[in-house]
């Protein structure tokens, strides 16, 4: 049992993302890093952005040049609104 637990913990640790070196670094065009409100917007339009990103390399669904935690919070809020979140999923089953 301890070996199985150790293997599971190692597998989870191997999947953890690394540090984003682009946090608080301006984009190559000189734009300021994306903040909370851009995170909300990017999360809200994620479905459209995902489809576009399949056909072009110049579009991605997540802005790496961001302010860190606040961008992530905004992105998750926008994502929850765009896909309905837990409330929308529960209502669909009823």
Image (tube, grey):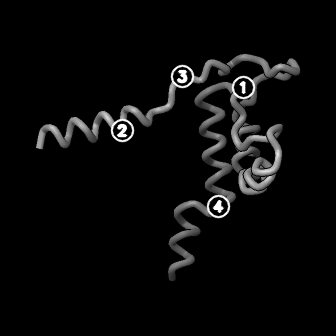
Query: Label 3 to label 1, Cα distance in Å?
Result: 12 Å
Q: Dot 2 corresponds to which residue?
A: 12
Residue at the spot of label 3 = 19
Determine the residue positioned at 76% across, 38% down.
38
Nearer the camera: disc 4 or disc 2: 2
- Determine crowd level at label 4: few under 14, some 14-19, many 20+ residues with C-alpha closer than 10 A: some
Q: What element carries label 3?
A: loop
**Residue 22 placed where, x, y %?**
67, 20
Q: Which mark is residue 83?
A: 4
Residue drawn at point x = 50 percent, y = 31 percent:
17
Label 1 to label 2: alpha-carbon separation = 26 Å
State which tag comes first along the sequence, 1 or 2: 2
Residue under numbered circle 1: 65
Tell me which label, 1 or 4, sits earlier in the chain: 1
Tell which residue pokes out farthest to the left in this image: 1
Tell me residue 58's x, y (percent): 83, 37
Pointer 4 or 2: first along the chain: 2
Q: Residue at x 27, y 41 (%)?
A: 8
Callout 4: helix, strand or loop? helix
Q: Which image quarter holds the N terminus?
A: top left
Residue 25 position by quadrant = top right
Give the distance between the C-alpha atoms of the residues marked 4 and 2, in whole angstroms: 26 Å
Of marks 1 and 4, the one in the foreground = 1
Image location of residue 76, percent across then percent down: 61, 46
Q: Alpha-carbon distance for marks 1 and 4?
A: 24 Å
User: Are dots 3 and 4 in contact, CB under 8 Å?
Assistant: no
């Amino acid at each position: 049992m301890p070996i199985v637990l150790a293997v599971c913990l190692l597998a989870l640790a191997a999947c953890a993302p690394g540090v984003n070196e682009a946090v608080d670094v301006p984009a190559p065009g000189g734009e300021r890093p994306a903040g909370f409100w851009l995170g909300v917007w990017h999360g809200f339009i994620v479905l459209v952005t995902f489809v576009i990103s399949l056909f072009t390399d110049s579009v991605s669904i997540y802005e790496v040049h961001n302010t860190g935690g606040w961008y992530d919070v905004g992105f998750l809020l926008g994502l929850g609104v765009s896909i309905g979140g837990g409330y929308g999923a529960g209502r669909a089953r009823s």
